[in-house]
Amino acid sequence: MNRISEFRKAANLTQVEIAKLINKTQGAFGHYETGLREPSLSTAKKIVRVLNEHGVTCSLDDVFPVG
């Protein structure tokens, strides 16, 4: 399970806002957040970059923990 929602809320971003920033639809982003779909590595890195740009210090491993 990923922690996208937790970090997105900490960054004070809506799904629509972060989706636009990573060039995805809100629907696609919602699927990433709920675990229905897994983002590509490139998209996962974009999500982490946007979160960091909005004041949340996190890494790829923080947002997408293994195991």
Image (tube, rainbow, N blue to C red):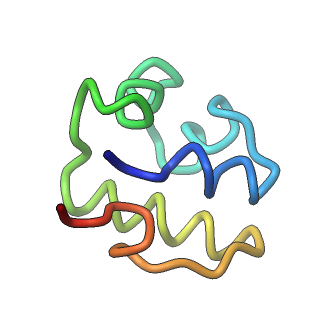
Q: Residue visible at 53% across and 24% down?
A: 26
- Choose top left, top right, bottom left or bottom right for residue 16: top right
Q: Residue visible at 69% across and 73% down?
A: 56
Outermost residue, right side:
12
Q: Does 13 appear above or below 28? A: below
Instruction: Provide residue 60's location: percent of width, then percent of height.
Output: 36, 73
Q: Does 62 appear above or below 31? A: below
Horizontally, residue 67 falls left or right of residue 35, namely: left
Q: Give the tally of numbered discs.
A: 0
- Choose top left, top right, bottom left or bottom right for residue 65: bottom left
Q: Does 4 appear above or below 46? A: above
Q: Residue visible at 36% across and 67% down?
A: 45
- Choose top left, top right, bottom left or bottom right for residue 18: top right
Q: Which of 2 and 40 is in front in this view?
A: 2
Instruction: Provide residue 4's location: percent of width, then percent of height.
Output: 50, 49
Q: Residue visible at 26% across and 24% down?
A: 36
Outermost residue, front side:
67
Task: State the quadrant of the N terminus.
Answer: top left
Q: Does 31 appear above or below 51? A: above
Instruction: Provide residue 54's location: percent of width, then percent of height.
Output: 74, 68
Instruction: Provide residue 46's location: percent of width, then percent of height.
Output: 42, 62
Q: Nearer the viewer, residue 13 or 36?
A: 36
Task: State the quadrant of the C terminus.
Answer: bottom left
Horizontally, residue 6 falls left or right of residue 59, namely: right
